[in-house]
Image (cartoon, rainbow, N blue to C red):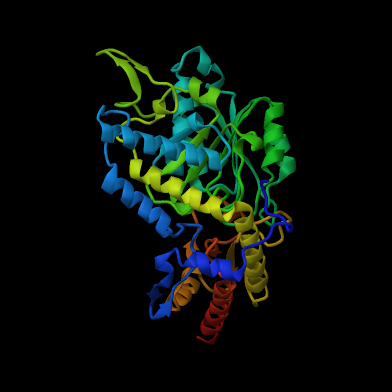
Amino acid sequence: MQNPTATETALSEAEVHRIREDFPILQARVNGHPLVYLDSGATSQRPLAVLDAERDYLTTLNAAVHRGAHTLAAEATDAFEDARAAVAGFVGVDDDEIVWTSNATEAVNLVAYALSNASIGRGGAAAQRLRLGAGDEIVTTEMEHHANLIPWQELAARTGATLRVIPLDDEGALRMDEAARLIGPRTKLVAVTHVSNVLGVVNPVEQIVATAREVGALVLLDACQSAPHLPLDLHALDVDFAVLSGHKMLGPTGIGALYGRRELLEAMPPFLTGGSMITTVTTTEAAYLPPPQRFEAGTQRVSQAVALAAAVRYLASIGMSRIAAHEAELGAHLVAGLSALEGVRVLGAGIDLPRVGLASFDVAGIHAHDVGQILDDAGIAVRVGHHCAQPLHRRLGVTASTRASTYLYTTRDEVDAVIAGVARAIDFFRRA
């Protein structure tokens, strides 16, 4: 299952309050008010199970992985690889198809630079299908986070390929007619977000993948806003690459992952080079390990990987389908409540697609930063700005927006608090 449906049983209010007990920070007070945290789309909070897992690793197992021959190093390596297996299972792929990165941005750049290296002849015959040059095309969309746009701009500049962009309609939905036109015989790669970090809509990835398959193009999926919120099976989606970020899914900062189809990872030349990713080195050349270690040069993010594994186990214990249903209910309530306020425009509200519990909105005549300040004064944390998606905002005719994003620990009362806070901001500035 890839999208929330009405048949799923959402978390009950009692269950959500029980979950909140696992998150100490949610008991905090900000500016004299109980914290209302609706910025999980930027960074989620961490439960005790995740905090304890990282601390336990550091106090009982901390050692260099894949290097030392002593017992502690072997046990640390086992913990590191067990974490890889946990994350792989969570997104429906094999252990050796998960590469650890510092974040999703690095994961996208890893693919972009590996393709760039293949394009100058690195990687041998197996990398032939990964090479780009003049006449080839990369396709992305107008709604992408900058991290899934700028690396492809740079790859096009390095290789002479052309970057094509699938446009949006007036509501903000992908123009699928244009996608079908732009993805053609010259397309080598399609890079698309699964869930928009501004609109909250779940894009029709299956349709995009099918179109790409017709012309032999590879597909990279930005799963940063879907892996934390929806059941995800990357093999079933049939994408070639996917990226995710730990800190958006109850894990720590400093850890992300790249999924790559095994045969593609085996063909790809490395991006970062150095220790721990080689078999033999002379003063003039080196031979590299098979993936995923080929792409994991240097000292690894071991405690962070262990913590991320604890995060996905925590999410799985609750059930991703139930989390998705809970957030779908909150998202619908959030959009309806905001849309009912005079002068409020919820970006993408009219798009007929499933959505996660996220809404970005513009208040006529009031800057997003001013709205955010009023909310912050009341202890309500939201995101303001362009959310690293300037082309999308430009297409929809706004400079910035205010974004409220929910998660498994968000209550309906908190959503109501945001709606009431926006109403107060409107009243305050209009009276002023």
Q: Nearer the viewer, residue 149 or 250?
A: 250
Q: In the figure, is residue 116 to the left or right of 273? A: right
Q: Nearer the viewer, residue 65 or 397?
A: 65
Q: Residue at x 37, y 46 (%)?
A: 304
Q: Residue 15 appears in which quarter of the rendering?
A: bottom right
Q: Where is residue 117 in the image (x, y as percent from the top left)?
A: 44, 23
Question: Across the whole image, how many numbered discs are drawn on residues?
Answer: 0
Q: Position of residue 250 (x, y in %)?
A: 46, 54
Q: Residue 51 appears in which quarter of the rendering?
A: bottom left
Q: Where is residue 421 in the image (x, y as percent from the top left)?
A: 53, 78
Q: Is residue 200 visible?
A: no
Q: Residue at x 44, y 69 (%)?
A: 26
Reply above or below: 216 against 326: above
Reply above or below: 365 against 165: below
Reply above or below: 389 against 182: below
> Residue pushed farthest bottom?
431
Q: Nearer the viewer, residue 5 or 424?
A: 5
Q: Where is residue 163 in the image (x, y as percent from the top left)?
A: 57, 35
Q: Residue 33 appears in which quarter of the rendering?
A: bottom left
Q: Which residue is drawn at 45% across and 37% down?
A: 84
Q: Is residue 30 visible?
A: yes
Q: Which residue is drawn at 54% across and 82% down?
A: 424
Q: In the figure, is residue 141 to the left or right of 180? A: left
